[in-house]
Image: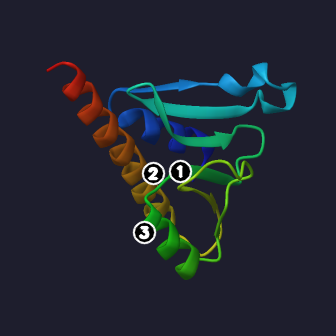
Amino acid sequence: MDIEQFREYCLSLGEVTEKTPFGKFAPRFDSLLVFYVLDHMFCMFDMDYFTSVTVRTTPEEETELYLNYRSVSRPVNRAMKYWVQIDFNGDISDEKILSLTRRAYEIIKDKYSKKKNSLNK
């Protein structure tokens, strides 16, 4: 999978926007491309070094992924609770990475759709 295929997949999920929001903190973060649904992050990767992707998960899924795959590690930013970094070209297939990306999208969309609906009542 190449960077454009992955980017197109993320954008195809619906109501997705992309930004490079972290460059304002330090120039070295200019190359982090972040995908959002309902204005909340669900996925990110480094455009300069497309070797891994970081996605949102649940506590249960996070534990399962750590136990079952060597390609899964904690994100560089340790403050990101319930996020995992997945290395490409490891022991996780491209199809599984796409599935985990879709799952990350669904987790965030479900969470913030409920909040949005409760505010509108």
Whole-percent x and y of residue 23?
Answer: 77, 23
Residue at image position (72%, 48%) is 77
Quadrant housing residue 39: top left
Q: Secondary structure at mark 3?
A: helix
Q: Which label is found at residue 55?
A: 1
Of badges 2 and 1, nearer the viewer stands 1
Residue projecting furthest to the left: 121
Residues packed near mark 1 inside 10 Å, few (<14), some (14 to 19) or many (20 plus): many
Whether pointer 3 and pointer 1 mark residues with C-beta atoms closer than 8 Å, the reply is no
Whether pointer 2 and pointer 1 mark residues with C-beta atoms closer than 8 Å, the reply is yes
Residue at image position (46%, 31%) is 40
Residue at image position (28%, 41%) is 110
Whole-percent x and y of residue 73?
Answer: 66, 65
Pick whichever, 76 or 52, lies toward us: 76
The CA distance from mark 2 to mark 1 is 6 Å
Q: Amino acid at mark 3?
A: Glu
Pick whichever, 108 or 14, lies toward us: 108
Residue at image mark 2: 101
Quadrant housing residue 46: top right
Of badges 2 and 3, nearer the viewer stands 3
Residue at image position (38%, 27%) is 38
Which badge, 2 or 1, is on the more N-terminal residue?
1
| Residue 111 versus residue 119 in the image, above or below | below
Whole-percent x and y of residue 28?
Answer: 85, 32
Pick whichever, 60 or 28, lies toward us: 60
Quadrant housing residue 88: bottom right
Residue at image mark 3: 60
Q: Secondary structure at mark 2?
A: helix
Total residue callouts = 3
Residues packed near mark 3 inside 10 Å, few (<14), some (14 to 19) or many (20 plus): few
Residue projecting furthest to the bottom: 68
Q: Is residue 21 left or right of residue 105?
A: right
